[in-house]
Amino acid sequence: MKKIILTLSLLGLIATMQSCNKNETSTTKIDFTKSYEDAASALASAQKNYAEALASNDPVKIETAKKQLEEAQTKYETAKNTYVTNGGEAKTEYENILTSSKETLEKTKETATNLGSSTVAETSEKVSSTIEKVDAKVATEKAKVNTAIEDTKTSIKQTNENLKKTAEDAKKTTADNINKTKQDLKNLLNQQ
């Protein structure tokens, strides 16, 4: 009797374990399906956010949305591979979202490259124009400074000539006055 009870208990235990294994397998499959669908939903949402960021023309928003879209693509592909490996089948609508998001990124990459090239050319033209304007202003100011220096040199030269003439005139006047005073003294002495 003990053998029968022991055998029945063992059979019950085996049946319970098999039942648990089936539940674990089906739970795992449900988890893969859910993660695959969640990744596809996140990819669709990221693509929508990227389109909105492009429409805003805000470089910071565009870059942030681009990174999120690239991350969503990677997560989707990882979830899809796990799902397919565990017996799931990739859905065409999700694959279309992935393809569309990749095309969107490629188109905007080309547009950004073209915009970048034209922006560099425009910036280069603006810098060249600014340099030319600054050079012209510098040349004008330099000419003004040179003219002012020449005017100052001329003024100093004229002042020096005037001072020299004044000194000569003063010296001549002094000499004339001394000679006149000497003559007057001689005349005065001769009269006496």
Image (cartoon, rainbow, N blue to C red):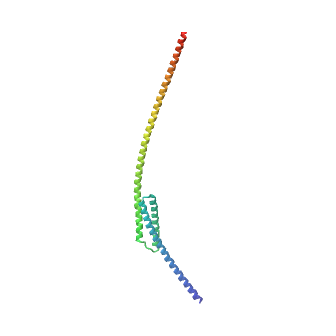
Total numbered circles: 0
Tell me what residue is drawn at x 51 percent, y 16 percent: 180
Residue furthest out toward the bottom = 1
Q: Quadrant of residue 1?
A: bottom right
Q: Quadrant of residue 93?
A: bottom left
| Residue 137 x %, y % | 43, 42
Screen quadrant of the C terminus: top right
| Residue 4 x %, y % | 57, 88
Tell me what residue is drawn at x 54 percent, y 12 percent: 188
Choose between 111 and 140: the one closer to the eye: 140
| Residue 41 x %, y % | 44, 69
Q: Quadrant of residue 115?
A: bottom left
| Residue 143 x %, y % | 43, 38
Asked if residue 116 is positioned above or below residue 2 in the image, the reply reads above
Asked if residue 140 is positioned above or below residue 92 in the image, the reply reads above
